[in-house]
Image (spheres, rainbow, N blue to C red):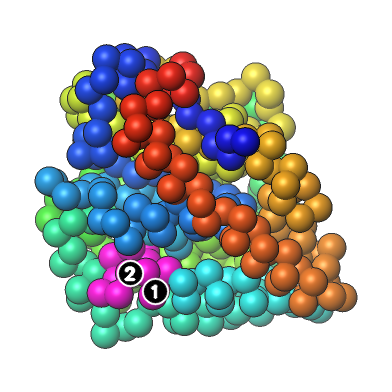
Amino acid sequence: MNSIRIKAGRKTYELIRDGGFSLDQVSTFFAPAAGPRWLVATGFDLTLLKAGFLGRKRPIQLIGSSSGAWRFAAWLQPEAEKSYRKLMDAYIRMSFSREDSARTVMDKLIDVVNAYLEDDALPFALASKQYRLAVVTARSRHLVASETIWIQSSGLLLCFLLNALSRSRLSSFLERVVFFSGPTRPRFSFHRSFHGSFVPLNQANFKQAVLASGAVPLAVAGIRDIYGAPRGIYRDGGLVDYHQTHDFAERDDEVTLFFHYQGRIIPGWFDKRLTYRSTPADVLDHTLLVFLSDEFVERLPFGKIPDRDDFRTFADDPERRIRYWQETVRLSESLGEQFLELLESGKLREAVEQL
């Protein structure tokens, strides 16, 4: 029974069908804002990470927002697999009470980040020649910058209404800020379609940027005045880039690898309920989308992918949630191997569908 499905944008589909695709052509690995859903990506990530298949011939961009950025921050560490597993364990064992505030939730997230990102390893991470990290955040303005819940909620409602008219109107309240490692800023930030700011990662702001990218509105306090970046409150990068919103390829033979928990690609957090809103097809021309099959999801505990609601559902029995999430990770272990088997056997040509 297939656990994954494969879809490709126009250029990548042609590349695969012509038999000309290899992992050396992957120039970007993209990870979406996903909350606890990222746990289904663990087996895929670890398979590629341990084998070192990405970035062998040239540095590869690792681009993510929210939990996607958390995943990729581990890839740059001296003992990357060990760091990634520490993230998994600390994240799964994190628990909240009904009395927790946005500030106390952030304090617990700080503990998770400190558990898998060691301060003395940051110079190594920043100097990586194999991986270039890009962490997407959203600098908040006006009402959305407030930590007073009713004021922030009012701002988010305005964002939803403005976004329903046009995504470009979000700029009144949210600015995309990308923190990056490497000698030059990410190539996609030079594109005419890119709107936002870019800030070099350093030892002082590395953890701040990762934390800010996962600062979910209302639930988590924002990060204020990140070192080296414009002053302000920084929140979850998924507010502006929930899933893929840019074509990261520079040439037609470059591929953006995207492991996803679902087949639908949604531009921004406010677009989740807008069924008519999706990422334009031409933006995905160079994308190779690997996502979970319905059959796989049905085999997961409770027949669903972990999500943030689980913290509330299992608030009185956190050990049950921990076991559920651990079992999800166990069932996801083979997903990377299944992808590699399709690639190495040549069956990817028959399995791939067009986006």
Residue at the (71%, 32%) spot, across then down: 273
Q: Which mark is residue 83?
A: 1
Answer whether residue 133 is magenta in the image: no
Residue sitting nearer the eye, 63 or 234: 63
Percent position of residue 34, x then y: 57, 50
- Total numbered labels: 2
Residue placed farthest to the right in the image?
316
* Contact flag, marks 2 and 1 (Cβ < 8 Å): yes
**The N terminus - image quarter:** top right
Crowdedness near tag 1: few (<14), some (14–19) or many (≥20) residues, C-alpha within 10 Å: many
* Three-letter amino acid code at the position of disc 2: Ala
The answer to whether one can see residue 169 in this image is no
Instruction: Report the span colored magenta.
Output: 73-84
Left or right: residue 164 versus residue 234 is right
- How many other residues sit within 10 Å of disc 2, few (<14), some (14-19) or many (≥20)? many
Pinpoint residue 175: horizontal percent, then vertical percent: 44, 46
* Residue positioned most to the bottom: 120
Above or below, 228 relative to 132: below
Q: Residue at x 52, y 56 (%)?
A: 333
> Residue at horizontal 59%, vertical 39%?
3
Q: How many angstroms separate mark 2 from mark 1 (CA)?
A: 5 Å
| Element class at badge 1 | helix
Q: Is residue 146 left or right of residue 304?
A: left
Q: Which mark is residue 184?
A: none
Q: Residue at x 18, y 56 (%)?
A: 130
The three-letter code of the residue at mark 1 reads Ser
Tell me the tag on residue 80.
2
Q: Is residue 316 above or below residue 242?
A: below
Image position, residue 94 (x, y; %):
64, 76
Q: Residue 45 is drawn in which quadrant? A: bottom left
